[in-house]
Amino acid sequence: MPSSLPQFQAGTRITPGREGAQAYAEAIAPVFDTRLRDVGARGPDLGINSFNIGPMLLGQAHMAGGVFGYGRDARKIAATGLELVLVQIIVGGEDHRSTGGDEIVARPGDVCLLDLTRTFQSETTHCTNINLALPRDAFDARDIDLDPLHGLVLRRESAGAQLLRSHAESLMRVAPDLAPEEAYGVGRATTDLLAGLTLGHRGEETRRAAAETQRARMRRFIDANLHDPDLDAELLCRRFGVSRASLYRLFAPLGGVSEHIRNRRLRRVFEALSDPAQPQAMAQVAERYGFTVWSSFSRAFKSRFGMTPGEARGQGAVAAAKATVQQAANGGLPDWLRALDAA
């Protein structure tokens, strides 16, 4: 296994001129549509430096030399399918952002939270931020309702913002030397820290007011019923009152509904096999999630995670780091985002 984390860099700071600007836009395309106007004579100053830290992506982005717009509308949400949480810590400059209500100005030290299943717009002329991308279901597993947190800005004066900024800056410093086998624990600890520091921002009134997307509800239902042998497209259509055509459109960005269910089942088996406290035989774990033919299951498992079921069991927690490195080895930031969403 490589001794360092997968790293991705793009922008005019890496490749000057139009090519660098295009590489920057393509890198963040799964998250935001971008707009650029009023570019200065020297052109835009753009840079992104990202690390794949197992259950989380970490990066720093810089933009200056023009007016930059970033947006995620209903069309973008449907096209990309990402169900991630994005945490942005402003470390330089500022941006003007809106999640459908009043405009908020985010300044250095502020921590901004976004649920990528919902809409967002921002504009800036100069901003540097540290970004953390985490799967939405990492918060579901901790019984955290994300709806009240979308668009939340923790101001720099608050203890929560100061702790998160300090943690994110420390992560950026150590990331180049962080070993992959350490990544899983770092990602979990960061999610726990974020969860704890947002506890005071989940009001009942706001929680009731916000609506969850149809696909997000379906994904929660799927994860809660992975053991059900009858879990398929037909069951989802009946349960949620949608046509097959509508269901297939909803899951097209995720590779299709059947592929999504299969990948989630494989992930659940992987988690069980790499857990040292899990005593069941490998075949029993696989059968629990609908894999009754060992040979086909083993091939699918190795294709998905780059190791056999036996290797996952033998390596324990280290297997998670190895699987992350394997999946990230030949991809860039857009691939990492999609893989994180499918984790």
Image (spheres, helix red, strand yellow):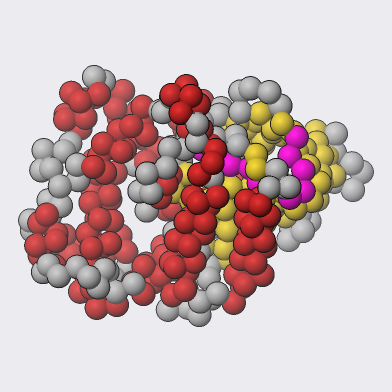
What is the quadrant of residue 67 in the picture?
Answer: top right
Q: Residue at x 90, y 48 (%)?
A: 42
Which residue is nearer to you in this view: 179 or 208?
208
Residue 253 vertical placement versus 208 (above, below): below
Which residue is nearer to you in this view: 132 or 259?
132
Q: Position of residue 30 (x, y in %)?
A: 53, 42
Residue 285 vertical placement versus 26 (above, below): below
What is the quadrant of residue 60 in the picture?
Answer: bottom right
Q: Residue at x 27, y 69 (%)?
A: 274
Residue 185 vertical placement versus 165 (above, below): below
What is the quadrant of residue 145 in the picture?
Answer: top left
Q: Residue at x 54, y 35 (%)?
A: 150
Q: Residue at x 23, y 63 (%)?
A: 272
Quadrant for the N terminus in the image: bottom left
* Residue range (magenta): 105-116
Q: Is residue 20 visible?
A: no
Indicate yes or no whether the magenta region holds residue 114: yes
Q: Position of residue 18 (x, y in %)?
A: 76, 47
Q: Position of residue 260 (x, y in %)?
A: 29, 44
Residue sticking out furthest to the right: 41
Q: Is residue 106 visible?
A: yes
